[in-house]
């Protein structure tokens, strides 16, 4: 029986965190790849992580590399390579530089792992998923972007702090692009099965929605030297787990929507069933007029950005 192989391209903050969490869960062997630079950073990080495995009692091999040959035959490819935001930058400011990076990576990695599921994490997220799809040549269902799990995790974290309840008991869904126009959905949010609208006043809920929309920027402002990576790494790991264990998890992810939600051919955040086939199904929920208008505005923003992508 062959072991599951997960390649993570970009051994920076998000890539490294993802590798560590993926190893701790014993999800498969991991290849951590980055560009050649002084020393051998990916090899150093990988060896350090592997040396933790006797303590953690997991048997995942973790290899650092600067060669795509080592990624051949991967079941999952994760792209976290790229330039992160600095204070004052929006995710969209990264478009040109990260398009080139994601395109080069997707082309090389996909050719060596033609049956993999490709998870894109690089920002601006929805546009970079489009780039990954085009450059890989993969069918749409095997290309998916991480954003909604992170955004909903932030909303859940804020609500758990607000109500003094377990994070585990807060459940929600979110739509749209991974930007400040994302669409958290209080109407689809519950705490232990109780609609959140019965527990938190409307105005306060709107404040928490707004904090969620700006959640990435809040971390950038605090860190000053880069963007979030603990919660993003955890979010990617949840997606890897859903795929390699074929769990059919219902998770908000950037998936290719054509007729779904009337999007008309674009990667955007929606609830999906995530399993070994990648995006196995997109779940359509009903939206009221306000939610639909917010979603359409967010989709229009993503489409405008994708139109600027030179690929
Ligand atoms: N091939 C492989 N790795 C690359 C390439 C490339 N062509 N270009 C850059 N990288 C690597 C860098 O060398 C670096 O190690 O990508 C890594 C990025 O790491 P960080 O700078 O620490 O950035 P990180 O915080 O991990 O964010 C990466 O994820 O959440 C998004 O907005 C974020 O787009 C950013 C990405």
Image (cartoon, grey):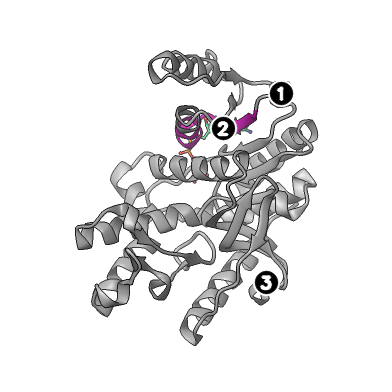
Separation of residues labelled 2 and 1 (CA atoms)? 28 Å
Instruction: Inspect this view and state whether residue 10 appears.
Output: yes
Instruction: Inspect this view and state whether residue 128 appears.
Output: no
Q: Residues within 10 Å of mark 3 (few under 14, many from 20)?
A: few
Q: SS of the residue at dot 2? A: loop
**In front of the other: label 3 or label 1?**
1
Separation of residues labelled 3 and 1 (CA atoms)? 38 Å
Residue lying at the far bottom of the rendered structure: 289
Residue at the location (29% across, 72% down)?
Answer: 205
Please name whichever residue, 248 or 227, is drawn nearer the observer in this view of the structure.
248
Residue at the location (51% across, 59% down)?
Answer: 178
Residue 23: x %, y % from top left: 49, 27
Q: SS of the residue at dot 3? A: helix
Residue at the location (51% across, 43% down)?
Answer: 236
**In front of the other: label 3 or label 2?**
3
Please name whichever residue, 68 or 6, is drawn nearer the observer in this view of the structure.
6
Q: Residues within 10 Å of mark 1 (few under 14, many from 20)?
A: few
Separation of residues labelled 3 and 2 (CA atoms)? 32 Å
Residue holding disc 2? 10
- Horizontal side of residue 59 vs 259, given as left or right: left
Asked whether the beta carbons under mark 3 and mark 1 sit within 8 Å of each other, the answer is no
Residue 38: x %, y % from top left: 53, 16
Considering only order in the chain, which callout, 1 or 3, is on the residue closer to the N terminus?
1
Does the magenta run of residues contain 9? yes
Considering only order in the chain, which callout, 1 or 2, is on the residue closer to the N terminus?
1
Residue holding disc 3? 260
Q: Cβ(mark 2) to ligand 1 < 8 Å?
A: yes
Specify the quadrant of the image occupied by residue 226: top left
Residue holding disc 1? 1
Q: Which residues are magenta?
A: 4-18
């Amino acid at each position: 029986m062959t072991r599951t192989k997960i390649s993570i391209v970009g051994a920076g903050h998000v890539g490294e965190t993802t590798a560590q969490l993926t190893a701790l869960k014993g999800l498969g062997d991991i290849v951590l790849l980055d560009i050649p630079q002084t020393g051998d950073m990916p090899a150093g990080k990988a060896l350090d992580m592997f040396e933790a495995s006797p303590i953690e009692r997991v048997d995942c091999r973790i290899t650092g590399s600067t060669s795509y040959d080592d990624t051949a035959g991967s079941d999952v490819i994760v792209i976290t390579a790229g330039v992160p935001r600095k204070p004052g930058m929006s995710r969209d400011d990264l478009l040109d530089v990260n398009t080139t990076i994601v395109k080069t990576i997707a082309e090389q990695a996909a050719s060596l792992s033609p049956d993999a599921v490709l998870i894109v994490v690089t920002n601006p997220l929805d546009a970079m998923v489009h780039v990954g799809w085009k450059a890989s040549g993969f069918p749409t269902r095997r290309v998916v972007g991480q954003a909604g799990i992170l955004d909903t995790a932030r909303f859940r974290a804020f609500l758990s702090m607000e109500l003094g309840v377990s994070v585990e008991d807060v459940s929600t869904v979110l739509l749209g692009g991974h930007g400040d126009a994302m669409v958290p959905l209080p109407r689809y949010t519950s705490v232990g099965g109780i609609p959140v609208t019965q527990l938190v006043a409307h105005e306060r809920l709107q404040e928490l929605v707004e904090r969620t929309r700006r959640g990435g920027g809040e971390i950038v402002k605090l860190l000053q030297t880069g963007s979030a990576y603990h919660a993003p790494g955890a979010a990617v790991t949840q997606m890897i787990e859903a795929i390699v264990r074929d769990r059919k998890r219902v998770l908000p992810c950037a998936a290719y929507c054509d007729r779904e939600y009337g999007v008309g051919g674009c990667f955007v955040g929606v609830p999906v069933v995530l399993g070994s086939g990648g995006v196995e199904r997109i779940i359509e929920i009903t939206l009221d007029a306000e939610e639909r208008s917010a979603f359409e505005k967010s989709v229009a923003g993503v489409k405008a950005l994708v139109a600027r992508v030179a690929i």
